[in-house]
């Protein structure tokens, strides 16, 4: 069983930045992909960014391209999400996930096996 623990959420004004962290309990991260998802009240969970852990290849959802960056620290078994130029519409609970899957499904929630408990991000205008 892989445990994922997120941290780094909080409240920020529009245009600000936050960095989320997700520490995995295993050196293998729990799969060949790690990803960040988010879910706002009344909305479905959506993929934000994913990374192919063996090579570090990155994949982003259109709304966050150019603003968010996903990265790995293999020494710490940790994946990060650097969020810049935040907008009120980025407000959501952010979840870290891990799994073994194909690239085409890297932003699909049902492709992932392990999930963290979530961390809240609130962006005010």
Image (spheres, rainbow, N blue to C red):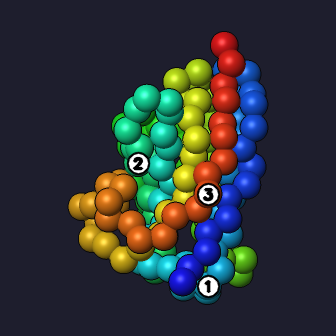
Residue 39 location, x and y as percent? 48, 39
Residue at the image point whose x is 43% and y is 29% from the top: 42
Sequence-wise, the earlier of marks 3 and 2 is 2
Res 45 quadrant in image: top left
Q: Residue at x 61, y 74 (%)?
A: 3
Q: State the residue at coordinates (72%, 44%).
A: 9
Disc nearest the viewer among 1 and 3:
3
> Which residue is nearer to you in this view: 102 or 71?
102
The quarter of the picture where the C terminus appears is top right
**Is 33 located above or below residue 108 in the figure?**
below
Which residue in the protein does label 3 denote? 117
**Mark 2 highlights which residue?**
47
Question: How much space separates mark 1 and mark 3, taking CA atoms?
Answer: 17 Å
Mark 3 against mark 2, which lies toward the viewer?
3
- Image position of 29 with respect to 83: above or below: below
Quarter of the figure with residue 4 = bottom right
**What residue occupies the far left of the structure in this picture?**
104
The reply, left or right, for residue 28 in relation to residue 20 is left
Which of the numbered marks, if any, corresponds to residue 103? none
Residue 75 is left or right of residue 60, and the answer is right
Residue 71 shows in the view: no
Q: Residue at label 1?
A: 26
């Amino acid at each position: 069983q892989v445990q994922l623990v997120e941290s780094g959420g909080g409240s920020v004004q529009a245009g600000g930045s936050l960095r989320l962290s997700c520490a995995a309990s295993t050196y293998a991260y729990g799969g060949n992909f790690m990803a960040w998802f988010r879910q706002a009240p009344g909305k479905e969970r959506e993929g934000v960014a994913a990374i192919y852990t063996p090579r570090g290849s990155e994949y982003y959802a259109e709304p966050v391209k150019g603003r968010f960056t996903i990265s790995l620290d293999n020494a710490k078994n940790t994946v990060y999400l650097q969020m810049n130029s935040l907008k009120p519409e980025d407000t959501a609970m952010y979840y870290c996930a891990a799994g073994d899957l194909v690239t085409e499904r890297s932003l699909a929630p049902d492709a992932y096996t392990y999930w963290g408990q979530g961390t809240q991000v609130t962006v005010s205008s």
